[in-house]
Amino acid sequence: MCRCLKVSHSGYYDWRNRPISATEQRRQDLTVKIRFYFDESDGTYGYRRVAAELARAGESVHPDTVRAIMRAEGLVAHSRV
């Protein structure tokens, strides 16, 4: 596989064993919080309301980041009927 991708063996193992970056760790933490607020709303909160809930909880995050994470997680708001 390394030969096909033109990557050295040592480079591959260095990448594989590298610790998670601070950015990725923050994104994972935000994903847990976003999913919590989304589930608490019974799936009715969109990215704006979730971002507002995070702000009320003291979490500084841009709404576009919330939107991107929700999209990646497949969280789509539904209206109550």
Image: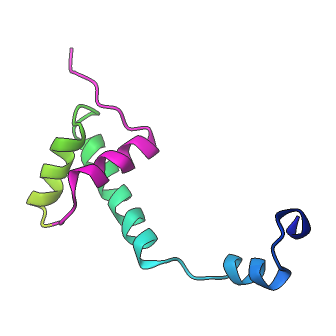
Residue at the extreme top of the image, as rendered: 81
Compared with 74, 62 (above or below) is below
Residue at the spot 21% in from the left edge and 36% down from the top edge: 45
Residue at the spot 12% in from the left edge and 59% down from the top edge: 55
Task: State the extent of the magenta-drawn residues as a range.
Answer: 59-81
Q: Is residue 70 magenta?
A: yes
**Quadrant occupied by the C terminus:** top left
Compared with 16, 39 (above or below) is above
Compared with 23, 72 (above or below) is above
Residue 53 x %, y %: 14, 52
* Foreground pick, 33 / 19: 19
* Residue 73 appears left or right of 29: right
**Quadrant occupied by the N terminus:** bottom right
Q: Quadrant of residue 78?
A: top left
Q: Is residue 67 magenta?
A: yes
* Residue 3 appears left or right of 46: right
